[in-house]
Amino acid sequence: MNQTYRHNQIIALIEQRNFVSIDELVDHFKVTPQTIRRDLNTLAKTNSITRHHGGACLGSSTKNTEYLERKGTNQQAKNNIARQLVQLIPNNSSLFINIGTTTEAVAQALIHHENLKVVTNNIHVASILSENQSCSIIVAGGEVRNNDGGIIGESTIEFINQFQMDFGIIGISGIDEDGSLLDYDYREVRVSQSIIRNSRQVLLAADHTKFGRNAMIRLGNINEANHLFTDFDPSENIKNLLQSNGVQLHIT
């Protein structure tokens, strides 16, 4: 098969599915994984795609994909991550939950926990957990972002800083190969930084599409987490970074 044709077909598949894995492309084109990796690396160098560990997607470093599209992407993986993460949360715990579709899956998985005290800047998280009669929910004040129900701004940061919680549950848009945690909205990033500072343990939840995803604002580093929950083995570089900083890796 002509390489240029295959490259065009790869881009077309990514446009259709938002994310495609190396295994899917190998099966589709009947070529070796090495060939697909070379194709993806070539396309990434021309900014035609965004390369991830295990696959690729179309993406921008300046603008996140729409909420409903993110909500439907890798939902089973997010649910699996959430189910494993909440096993670490005992009843009678206090926790922050930030903005993100993965953290919303975590909220859903916490429905049957008892006597939780939750502070969140995510309207959807508050709505989900309102079904749990024993759960006390405190919603941070601030500006509500229309596209995804996130609450952001200086007053949100001031509100978060009043608490010291057992757990901070963090979702993220991208994780660079050097461990940088990346996101798109500076105001959202500052709130998440406050959550990390005011949490005794930080639980980072990120499916494999977040690795290598390029967003322009640096939130912090993966070494600030105590636990990372994901659905695929990350790169050796990331695993070494986790190990050297005592971050426990959980793969669903």
Image (cartoon, helix red, strand yellow):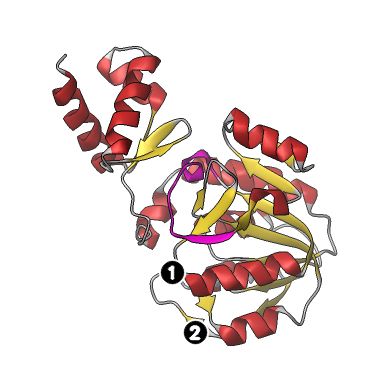
Image location of residue 90, percent across then percent down: 83, 55
Image location of residue 220, percent across then percent down: 62, 58
Q: Is residue 109 visible?
A: yes
Quadrant of the rendering where the C terminus is positioned: top right
Quadrant of the rendering where the N terminus is positioned: top left
Q: Amino acid at mark 1?
A: Asp
Give the structural element (helix, strand or loop) at label 2: strand
**For residue 143, which numbered disc appears in the image?**
2
Region of the chain picked out in magenta, as a range = 207-219
Which residue in the protein does label 1 denote?
A: 148
Q: Quadrant of residue 157?
A: bottom right
Q: Is residue 215 magenta?
A: yes
Q: Compare marks 2 and 1 and give the one earlier in the sequence.
A: 2
Q: Amino acid at mark 2?
A: Glu
Q: Are marks 2 and 1 in contact (CB under 8 Å)?
A: no
Q: Is residue 141 visible?
A: no
Q: CA distance from mark 2 to mark 1?
A: 12 Å
Image location of residue 250, percent across then percent down: 70, 37
Residue name at image x 39 percent, y 61 percent: 67
Q: Quadrant of residue 9?
A: top left
